[in-house]
Amino acid sequence: MNGLHTLTIHEAYDLLRKREISSRELTQAVLERIEAVEPRVRAYITLTPDLAMQQAEEADSLLQAGDGADVLTGIPIALKDNLCTRGVLTTCASKILQNFVPPFDAHVVEQLRQRYAVFTGKTNMDEFAMGSSTENSAFFVTRNPWNLDCVPGGSSGGSAAAVAADMCIAALGSDTGGSIRQPAALCGVVGMKPTYGRVSRYGLVAYASSLDQIGPITKDVTDCAILLNAICGKDRRDSTSVDVPVPDFTAALVSDVKGLRIGVPKEFFAQGVAPEVAEAVYQAVRLLENLGATAEETSLPYIEYGLACYYILAPAEASSNLARYDGVKYGWRTQELAGHIGMVEKTRGEGFGAEVKQRIMIGTYALSAGYYDAYYLKAQQVRTLIRRDFDRAFEQYDVLITPTSPTVAFRIGEKADDPLAMKLADVCTIPVNIAGLPALAMPCGFHNGLPIGLQIIGKPWDEETVLRVAYTFEQATDWHRHRPVL
Ligand code: GLN
């Protein structure tokens, strides 16, 4: 059989279950695809072909035995390089962790291993997940499979590019201010950030702990629900993971939005949103209206302060989280002899990239005595106002629909020297993290051959309605079937 690398999880599962293909054949096809296109896309920091083939063999024995196999058994999955993998390099795309081999698995990695998924490797990202283009990777830039001169988005750009280029069947990413949804949008695939507390972050290298969530990046909405099923749930090793029932998310894949109330917040169409993006999103809303939903414009006035609020809170938390990289226990240590304090200073000076250093300085400043009230505390208060804006909106609407990224993918280098322009790439996604809500990005059109992404935002813990709207839209369109030519 040809083209196995192009399959979705559910298509592959169907063939695996009927024994029309083996996981070995599927994994081999994905590895061959990687060999063919990875030199141009560069989605992976570390490839694990030997591990993948060994896991595929184990999966095949299980599939042959017939019992104990899961929908993810034998499915090649890529992992963002900030998810700890036992025995496999986990760099966070940073020099300071360039030799770090974790002795343990992240919770989500454990969950996939228990289901006998296959790991293709660790994907490129912005260093410590700080960025929107993968240009902040300490190692190399990942390219957008739709146009190799453009960025794939970030920070989970490697995961999104790998899915779009069929260099894995699905992937995991992390999202602090948009890092799953924005690259998914720019690469024309599906990405979801679950409700804050849905997924344990045990073993996710922390960036901003009150915002970070792990989530799926997939080729369609069905795969998104499947992967979500595997990673959600309470884990005592992450005290922020919440003990709420985890539904079977695939049960929400119903093509029906009759009577559903959609809010379209006008603030998400301001602040640099390109007309072609706005138009594609409005068209998507009209389509859902034709399918029986009602939609109206609404306003969330405090969204305007989302970016400013985030760029105090996220660096503040990062400055604390990144204090652990001191060259003592693990990671990079300077080669120069400089005494203890000097060793820590030099280690951090050599190990962190410019963007990370800038964030540590901003965060330290915002938290320091005398400035704490003016910046950090104020940002926390603004956070409450933004959350209340969403609460009010969800009294009237079941979901909110907005663009995911204000523009299609931009050219490599285009925004590298303009930090404000780069940060505006997350203007539509950041408020969702601030409020801890679930949201999904999916393709809804093209401009100049590059994908446009829709964002569907849901009430806390209501991933199901988000998935239902996404599934309905997907059934009525064929944007998800377009693939880049490589
Ligand atoms: N681009 C945003 C940042 O740089 C969000 C990144 C993310 O979600 N990890 O912080």
Image: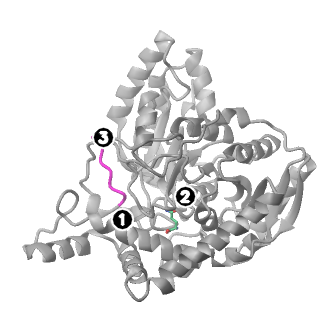
The magenta region covers: 87-93
Q: In which quarter of the view is residue 337 placed?
A: bottom left
Total numbered labels placed on residues in the image: 3
Q: Earlier in the sequence, mark 2 or mark 3?
A: 3
**Image height of 100 relative to 105, above or below:** below
Of badges 2 and 3, the one in the foreground is 3
Q: Is 459 placed left or right of 186 in the picture?
A: right
In front of the other: 183 or 466? 466
Residues at marks 3 and 1, CA–CA distance in whole angstroms: 21 Å
Q: Dot 2: what SS?
A: loop
Q: Quadrant of the N terminus?
A: top right
x, y (%) of residue 234?
A: 50, 41
Of badges 3 and 1, the one in the foreground is 1
Q: Is 453 inside the magenta-drawn segment?
A: no
Q: Is 424 placed left or right of 78 in the picture?
A: right
Q: Dot 3: what SS?
A: loop
Tell me which amino acid carries mark 2. Asn
Q: Which residue is mark 3?
A: 86
In front of the other: 165 or 308? 308
Q: Which residue is mark 2?
A: 144
x, y (%) of residue 142?
A: 46, 59
